[in-house]
């Protein structure tokens, strides 16, 4: 079964918009775990627009031994204020998985992946650092990407497919071309020895079609749509609905 990792960033966005501690990210995490999710994801950024380093630490203690912990981020974004940098934060909390994403402050959300054919030498030392910490290393990539054998050679264990283009095509009414590209990319990555994750703009409407097209899909990380749907359906019910789709 494909593991559902719930991204909690939007819980932190709501909290930060008002200040204080509500909605409480630890309560949200426990609700998702009790509903049956297999993992939780956070994406701390240096500008701390949503999840903060303090949240990352709180969740580390809460999740240990219960579900997988996936921390996303740009390994090349340096320390700033209370943000110690992705490597240092992961060294401190030891997540199950780190997902490397080439985002910057100017991006509202992640909108592209690494190019493994061009970025492999730059990624090599940071992948080694995360592997030394004990993290499983996943790299955010676009459909149609290359360089998977090189990624395996430097210690990458998974890719996460950036599914924004698929979600947009699905919304427009015809995602067949994008699905074929994602399926072929996943097949080549798996042949190279990588497990395949996916995430970005996946929803209850489009997830089943995507999963059906990607045999062996290891994990999906879903936050924005899931939290939005939870406003109407309730958080626990929404998590269960996603699990039903994946099973």
Image (cartoon, helix red, strand yellow):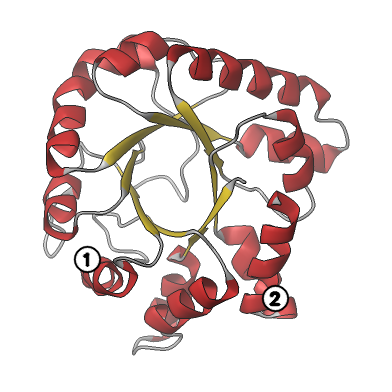
Asked whether disc 1 touches disc 2, contact meaning CB atoms under 8 Å apart, the reply is no
Q: Is residue 78 above or below residue 166?
A: below
Question: Which residue is more in the foreground, 90 or 22?
Answer: 90
Tell me if 191 is positioned left or right of 181 in this view. left
Tell me if 203 is positioned left or right of 216 in this view. right
Q: Is residue 241 above or below residue 45?
A: below
Q: Quadrant location of residue 136?
A: top left
Residue on which disc 1 sits: 53
- Considering the numbered disc 2 on the image, is that residue within a helix, a strand or a loop? helix
Mark 1 or 2: in front is 2
| Residue 243 x %, y % | 67, 59
Q: Residues within 10 Å of mark 1 (few under 14, many from 20)?
A: many
Q: Is residue 74 above or below residue 108?
A: above
Residue on which disc 2 sits: 237
| Residue 52 x %, y % | 27, 67
Residue found 57% across the figure and 68% down from its top: 36
Q: Residues within 10 Å of mark 2 (few under 14, many from 20)?
A: some
Residue found 73% across the figure and 59% down from its top: 244
């Amino acid at each position: 079964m494909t593991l559902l990792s719930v991204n909690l960033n939007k819980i932190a966005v709501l909290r930060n918009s008002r200040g204080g501690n509500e909605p409480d990210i630890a309560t949200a995490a426990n609700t998702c775990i009790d509903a049956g999710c297999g993992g939780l994801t956070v994406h701390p950024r240096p500008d701390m627009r949503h999840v903060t380093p303090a949240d990352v630490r709180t969740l580390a203690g809460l999740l240990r031994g219960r579900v997988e912990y996936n921390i996303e981020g740009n390994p090349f974004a340096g320390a700033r204020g209370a943000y110690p940098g992705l490597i240092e934060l992961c060294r401190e909390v030891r997540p199950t998985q780190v997902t490397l994403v080439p985002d910057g402050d100017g991006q509202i959300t992640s909108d592209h992946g690494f190019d493994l054919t061009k970025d492999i030498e730059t990624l090599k030392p940071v992948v080694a650092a995360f592997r030394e910490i004990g993290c499983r290393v996943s790299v955010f990539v676009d459909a149609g990407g290359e360089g998977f054998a090189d990624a395996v050679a430097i210690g990458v264990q998974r890719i996460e497919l950036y599914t924004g283009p698929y979600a947009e095509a699905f919304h427009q009414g015809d995602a067949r071309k994008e699905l074929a590209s994602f399926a072929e990319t996943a097949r080549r990555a798996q042949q190279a020895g990588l497990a395949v994750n996916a995430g970005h703009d996946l929803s209850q409407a489009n997830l089943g079609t995507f999963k059906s097209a990607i045999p062996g899909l290891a994990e999906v990380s879903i936050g924005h749509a899931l939290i939005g749907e939870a406003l109407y359906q309730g958080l626990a019910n929404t998590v269960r609905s996603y699990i039903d789709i994946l099973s």
